[in-house]
Amino acid sequence: MKPRRAWADERIENDAEIIRRREVSRVVSAKNLSPEEAEVVESMSRSLVDGLLRGPISAALGRAADRRTRVGRRLGR
């Protein structure tokens, strides 16, 4: 069974996305980037944020799954 996404994980991703968009917008405006350059910055920032969050979120989901398994064993499931 695939673990359900925790509310905190979704909030972290949402907060990171808000920050990412704000920073991309700031850089694109400040440096007067072309649409092509802006797309490169956008793509790179998305990859960076996804990569940074993948490990911590995966670890948190793994811990949550372990807890559910232990609780299920205690309840005889």
Image (cartoon, helix red, strand yellow):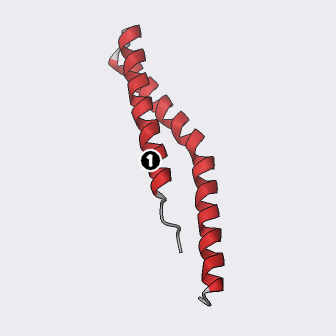
- Indicate whether 32 appears above or below 18: above
Q: Which residue is rendered at x = 60% and y = 87% of the image?
A: 75
Reply above or below: 57 against 52.
below
Q: Position of residue 26 (x, y in %)?
A: 39, 17
Choose top left, top right, bottom left or bottom right for residue 61: bottom right
Image position of 5 (left or right of 57): left
> Which quadrant of the figure has residue 62?
bottom right
- The residue sitting at the bottom extreme is 76
Quadrant of the rendering where the C terminus is positioned: bottom right
Splitting the image into 4 quarters, where does residue 31 fall? top left
Residue at 43% from the left image edge and 23% from the top image edge: 23
Residue at 64% of width from left, 62% of height from top? 63
Type of the residue with mark 1: Arg
Please tell me which residue lies in front, 29 or 63. Answer: 63
**Residue where numbered disc 1 is placed:** 11
Image height check: is 48 above or below 28? below
Q: Nearer the viewer, residue 5 or 45?
A: 5
Q: Residues within 10 Å of mark 1 (few under 14, many from 20)?
A: few
Side of 1 relative to 11 (left or right): right
Q: Is residue 50 above or below residue 5?
A: above
Q: Nearer the viewer, residue 73 or 51?
A: 73
Residue at 45%, 56% in the rendered image: 7
Residue 72 percent coordinates (x, y): 60, 82
x and y percentages locating residue 6 in the rendered image = 49, 59
Q: Secondary structure at mark 1?
A: helix
Query: How many callouts does the rendering have?
Result: 1
Q: Position of residue 40 (x, y in %)?
A: 44, 25
